[in-house]
Each structure stands twice: as structure tokens, then as C-alpha cells.
Amino acid sequence: MPACLHGKGIPMNLTHMNPNDKFEPRSTGNWIYNPATGERVAEVLEHEPAVVPLMVQQSRMAQAEWVTVPYREKRLCAQRASRWIEEHADTLALSIARCTGKTRTEALATEVLPGAIAFRYYSKRVPHVVHPKPLKPSSFLFLNKKSIQHRLPYGVIGMITPWNYPFGIPVHEVAAALLSGNGVILKVATQCQPVGELIRRMILEAGFPPALFHLVHLGGSKVGTAFLDGGIDKLFFTGSTETGKILMQEAGKRLIPVSLELGGKDAMIVLSDAPLKRAAAGAVWAGVSNCGQSCGGVERIYVERPVYDTFLSLLRQEVRQIRQGPDSFDVDIGSLTTEEQRKKVIAQVQEALSRGARLIESSPSPFKSPVANPSEPPGKSAETPHLERNQGILAPWASHHGFPLFYPVQIIEVDSDAGSLMQEETFGPILAVSAVDSEEEAICRANDSSYGLTASVWSLSKDRAARVASRLQAGVVTINDHLMSHGMPETPWGGFKQSGIGRTHGDLLIEELTQVKVVVWERLPRMKRNIFWQPIDSTVYEGLKGTLSLMAGKGILHRLQGAKKLFRLLARKVRF
């Protein structure tokens, strides 16, 4: 039993509740495959939707007691979770890599390490955000009142998280939710169920009450209804804008609040005084990390014309150096995660080329690499054919179950923002580059999007960068960097327009996970009645008008006349 469960602050019935026997999922007979190799990873599990209300009920019972546990005990659990991540870093990185197709190094840098930081950060920050705050009276009329603002947990939070960052995204929200006093029902993407099981194991072994947190395995078409009908108090969803709209509509019918972190079409602006070598390297890092499957990654690059050719040359050099392949310490990026995503990327590039866009550069194709054949006995493997070119686009190739799902990093030069490549989220390793004649044109084109998640400005002039950043319609703007703020738990994450509603990370995430209650105290409880209570007469009316004159009257004489009327009312009404 973890040490923090032995603390006197946690009731023993919480430590002995074990929900796992009651909610065992069934095997579906389908398999999860490593998208970079085709090897089998795990069998797909599925719960019956009917278990969700039972999970919510059990979590609610545990939450009612968890909220009374002294915060020092909660902090101990968070510290153990952070330590658990450190001790199991290799296991986590490998599981993430096998489920998503990214490399272990990338998984460690963008998910595992930020997860450990998140638990430590929120364990320190939550008490400051939820601590009761006195509110200063807005008028002398309320000097007899003392108002205290409290933040209380919602109760049970439902979370639906995607496959692109199966550990990094949920861990931030789970950590903040539990430390804020909530219970959590988490659904991870089916492709990443093994990572979800590691999250569940981490929560249990860190000492959080077992019934407080549940992991549910349901298909995407079932989970929204199951959560909303199951009794959750708030829904957190990270995923596509289309699905987010559907969930928001359904939640609205039940008046269940939602937090939505949706898609992006993020712009990078390279000004004429930018550090060009850093900008080119940063564009590739933020544009193709996770094989471009980052909602906050670079998708559109607008470069001022005086430095366009130089920047493009540097960008091509960076792309030529990219090493792509199955997970290895000498590989920079892995594969796409789903066949559906690969088809979408191919379609967008084909459409762009048909509109006159130009393929400027592609990264080297992966060499032949062994791919496990799921139809063969263990120990046998098949080789992936060399990747082939077809009019400058990576052509699909024959392989077992459609794997591997590699797609090269490509630079596409465009002259306009028409078409899906510049208007719709790509979620692939495509860098669309366009020259602009002015700072103003760059800002206008960057803002000409239905999305507004992140953006970046690259310039050595602080004043110029700040000026451009202030006009960009995005929830996160970074200067001379991009994407990395998602790993910083102190910086709120969320977007404008169709990129979502609400914020995750930072104090705003804690506020999203709690509700405001204001308690107003009467400082003079022995006073028999307030001055405007019944019975009402002309003195009350004149006295209230006098209050207005005292606060907002023109000239000292007018205000003194108002004070006289107010004092007359006080003399008549105040009685102890």
C-alpha cells in the first residue's frame, strides 16, 4: 500500500475499494498494431456502455470523501505519481512509441517528461488557486458585508483524449482534476489503450483512492453518449472540431459544461530580421514532430520576401537531413498513426499540386526495414518495399495490414491560401510555405483561418515581434519558437474561433475544473433590518437617490446634499 494511503487523512474505506474486478473489459478479437512496423501491440478491449454510470457512481462516492482529505495527503500522492513516471520512463516511452509510431526519444521529450513536471506543478499550484479569496467591497454601501469567493470541485469529470499524445495530454488534466478534488473517468483512443492502462496503473500505485479514477474502453461513437448520460459533471474533450461540435450540442441538451481543445491550422511568420537558421530548424521541429500530428504544430509558413529565398534554402537543408523510420535512437521521426490520416495527407497534397502549388523538397525515404507480419508465427518478418515516388507524392505501398504508415516530410510552395492544404487541419509532415510582401500581409493571411490555436513570430526585434503577436488571433503565440509551450504546465493552452472553448494548463485549467461559490457575510448581524427592507416609504426612495448623488453626483455641493439624504435614511432605519 503506498505510503500516502496510510496517512490519517485518507479514510480506510477509500483505500480498500477496488473497482477493477467489477469493470473488467472484454476482448474484441481485434488488434492494435504498431503503425511504424506493423507488429501486434495488444488486443483491443471494450467495456459495455452500461458500466459508465456505475463508474461515475463509484467515483462520486469516493470523491465525496476525497474532497475532505487534507491537501498534504493529496500532494503526497502527486509526488508519488511524478516519481512513478521517472521510475517507469522507459516502459512509458516504449508503449507510447509502439502505439503511435513515434520514436521513444520523442515520447520521452514531449509526453513522459512533461507528465512528471505536471504532477509536481499542480501539486504546488492548486492550493493557491482554490484558496478562499476575500472580495473588496465595490461601494461604501456594502461596507457591512464580507464576501468570500470559494472554488469547489465539479465532482466527476469525464475526459476523452486523442491518439497523438496519449500520455502527455490526459496526464495534465488528470493531475489537475484529482488534486482539485474531482473524480475522473478517462477514455483514451482505442489505438492507445496500452498507454491508458499505464496511466491507470500509475494512479493506483501513486496512492490515489482506487474508486476515484476509472479508465473506460469504448469506441468513439459510443463514449460521448455514455459519458453524458452516465452522470458526469463536466466533459473535457480533445480532438477534431467536427466531433467537438457534436459533443457540445449533445452536452447542451443536458446543460453539462464542456471544455474543448480542438483543431488548429497554425501559422509561423518569419520576418525580415528573423534568426533564419533557428527559424528553419524550428519550423521543421514544430512542423514534423510526431510526424506532423500535433494540433499546435507549424502548418503554414509566411516569410517576408527579402529573406524568402535564404529561408527556403535553409529549410530544404533541414528537411534533407531528417531521418525517418521505425523507433530507433538514430531516427528523428516515426510514422503517421492511422491509415485514415495518411489518406488525408495524400489527398491534401494532391489537391494543392493540382491548384498550382509546387513540391520543393521531400525528406529521404526510409530504407528497407523489418516489419512483423501479424499473419506469420512469431520470429518471422517481412520487409517493407522501398518507398516510391509518384508525381512527387509518396505512393501507398503494399504491406501487411497497410503498415508501415510512413509519409515523408515535404515542403510545398503555395501562392494563395485557397484549398484544403491551407484551410483545413493537415495533421501530417507538410510544411506549406508562402512569400509575403509585408508584415501586414503576413498578419492578415495568418488570421484568415477558421482556427486559432497557436502561432509564432520569428524576429530579433522585440518591439516588432510583440507588435505582430498582439494582432494574431491565436490562443498561444510564441516568439522565436513554436509548439513547445504545451509541455509547460504553467502556460494556458487553448484557442480562438473553432480551435475550442476553455483552456487547459495553468491556473485556468484549475479554474475549469472547479466551480465558484461566493459566501457573503453580514458584518452587523444584530442590526434588525437592512435600510431598504420593508416597510418602504418616501424616505427610503429619497435616501437611495441620495446614495446615487453621493457616488456619482456632479460637484461637491450636490454630493453633500446626497449624503444628507442618505444619513436621514440611516438614522431612521438602522436599529439594533
Image (cartoon, rainbow, N blue to C red):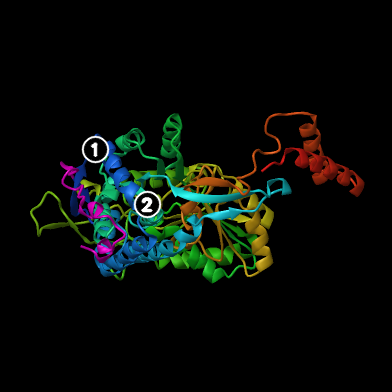
Q: Which mark is residue 67?
A: 2
Tell me if residue 475 comes above or below residue 487 in the rendering. above
State the residue lying farthest toward the front. 576
Residue at (46% x, 60% y) in the render? 127
Provide residue 25's location: percent of width, then percent of height: 18, 43
Tell me if 37 is positioned left or right of 158 in this view. Answer: left
Q: Earlier in the sequence, mark 2 or mark 1?
A: 1
Task: Give percent across and percent down for residue 27.
Answer: 15, 43
Q: Residue furthest left?
A: 377
Residue stretch in magenta? 1-30
Q: Amino acid at mark 2?
A: Val
x, y percent for residue 443: 64, 53
Instruction: Please state the horizontal and vertical placement of residue 253, each as a whole percent of the image.
Output: 44, 29
- Residue 534 horizontal side relative to residue 418, left or right: right
Residue 263 seen from this side: yes
Q: Is residue 509 above or below residue 478?
A: above
Q: Residue at x 80, y 29 (%)?
A: 538
Q: Which residue is mark 1?
A: 51
